[in-house]
Amino acid sequence: MTYNVSDIIKSAKQIADLENSNFISWNENIRLINEAYTTIHQKMINKGDFTFTDEILISNKEQPLPENFYQVLSVLDNYNIPVPRYSIGMNDSQIWYKLINNKIVLNGLSSAKFSYYTKPTFLT
């Protein structure tokens, strides 16, 4: 089933008995629907749903994050073993990754598979 944003807003106005009313502006409707969509998007991520995922191969020690990056799902080495995120106390002889200045930085690896959740789409 597919809905247009305008259909959702029209249905919400009918339920609230606000048809043919400008009590809530179009911009406010768009803001509210995007807040609701972002909340649902995050709740699905929190539940472990993989609907909004993508992956790339990192082939350098430092690589810019994808434009649609939202949250890290996993970083796996060439043997599909999880790579830990850098934490204080780790040193350069250990394998880790960190996110810094819109880049993913690998230490101790030349390549890895980076799985991530994508940004929620802005609805108009």
Image (cartoon, grey):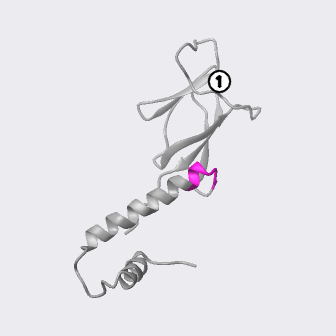
Which stretch appears magenta?
Answer: 44-50
Residue 37 point in image, percent of width and height: 45, 62
**Height in image: 61 above or below 124?**
above
Say if the magenta span includes residue 47: yes
Is 15 colored magenta in this rendering?
Answer: no
- Can you say whether 3 is above or below 85 in the image? below
Left or right, residue 27 beside residue 15: left
Q: Residue at x 22, y 80 (%)?
A: 22
Tell me how many marks there are.
1
SS at mark 1 in the image: loop
Q: Quarter holding the N terminus?
A: bottom right
Residue 68 screen position, x and y as percent: 48, 50
Residue occupying the far bottom of the picture = 20
Farthest-out residue, right: 79
Q: Please tell me whether residue 39 is drawn above or below residue 87 in the rendered image.
A: below
Q: Say whether residue 11 is left or right of residue 91.
A: left
Amino acid bearing label 1: Leu
Report the side of 54 relative to 10 (left or right): right
Q: Which residue is mark 1?
A: 109
Point 51% across, 52% down: residue: 42
Badge 1: how crowded within 10 Å, few (<14), some, or many (20+)?
Answer: some
Residue 104 position, x and y percent, is 51, 32
Q: Residue at x 56, y 23 (%)?
A: 86
35, 82: nearer the viewer = 35
Residue 117, compared with residue 121, is above or below; it is: above
- Quadrant in the picture for residue 116: top right
Between 118 and 6, the one lying in front of the other is 6
Indicate the quadrant where residue 85 lies.
Answer: top right
Q: Look at 64% across and 30% down and name the residue there.
A: 111
